[in-house]
Image (tube, grey):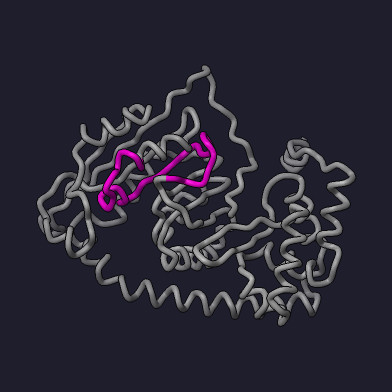
Amino acid sequence: MSDDDQSRAAVPGLSSDHALAALRGAGEATRLRILALLAGAELNVKDLTQILAQSQPRISRHLKLMAEAGLITRFREGSWVFFRAADSGPEGALARAIVGSLDPVDLTLARDRARAEAVQKARAEAAQSYFKAHAAEWDSIRTLHVAESQVEAAMDEALGEGPFERLVDLGTGTGRILELFGPRAKKVLGFDLNHDMLAYARMKLERAGLSQAQVRHGDLYNVPLPDEAADAVVLHQVLHFLDDPASAVAEAARVLAPGGKLLVVDFAPHELEFLREQSAHRRLGFDRDQLGRMLEGAGLKLARFRELSPGPAEGKLIVSLWLGQKPVTAGKRRKLSPKVEVAA
């Protein structure tokens, strides 16, 4: 049996009522155009009104019908609600089949794509402006420790080749971790509270063509995912910003499946007090045992620890990596559900 045949066999079919509801959800000219757009990008109501030149109430009604039919999913990001084509389950398979059957050179659809690209370009320019405004601050911190390439190589080695079913990055920032590990995971999710950073990360992921990577607005103390939803979680240079890092580690462990890995990257203890005022650092680093106790308290085993010390010309900060692993309780690894939606 081919991989495609196995994939189709693994997806349960739709009942006749659900199939008819889904087909009706796409069975209108504007809704079909919306589905084609959402198969290629995450868009909000304002985006769609600009692209399709239709009123907000009309677009909202179409989206509501399509969401009820299961063809699209929605997620909130501050005051905005974004939409994308369903990417799992039988409804997602049907949505992909419908979009895949469309003529790519159809003039209406081509015009829609061109307008969507213009909307995304404007959004990307706004995100770039935010990034440039803060780049100097981030660059100054990078000069205080070993090169990012060394840190990423150590992360790559610690987390392993995978492949991962679902990798989650908490405090994703620019989305760099999603870029780094995205190619080895079926799905990667990044959560952050900063809307500007999410816009920047989304722009980067779209440009990189990582369709399996998504970013969402979310609090890392209360991640909008069910228990055991991921087989790998990353906390990269996040904990030193937090008042309660142990709670963040415990929440990361909650969403980790048995046998899964939690990779924490942060600074070793240091005395650079200016980082508190200049860069809002709450903690001046963590030692091996301190974070090891947080992992143990969250039910994880410290499987690996490594320090990356800077050279004479690289500053004073030591970057530490902790790899925690969740015990396999039932003698075998739990199979992740393919359908974990992050919705409003």
Nearer the observer, 226 or 258? 226
Q: Position of residue 156 (x, y in %)?
A: 38, 45
Indicate whether residue 85 is drawn in magenta.
Answer: no
274 lies left or right of 57: left
Residue at x 17%, y 47% (from the top left corner): 309
**Eyeballing the image, is 283 above or below 279?**
above
Q: Position of residue 130 (x, y in %)?
A: 38, 74
Residue at x 55%, y 58% (from the top left corner): 210
40 lies left or right of 80: right
Indicate whether residue 231 is drawn in magenta.
Answer: yes
Quadrant into which the C terminus falls:
bottom right
**Eyeballing the image, is 150 above or below 305?**
below
Location of residue 84 (image quadrant): bottom right
Residue at x 36%, y 42% (from the top left corner): 248
Location of residue 292 (image quadrant): top left
Q: Position of residue 261 (x, y in %)?
A: 42, 35
Q: Read off the magenta span.
A: 222-248
Residue lying furthest top: 331
Nearer the observer, 80 or 134? 80
Quadrant into which the N terminus falls:
top right
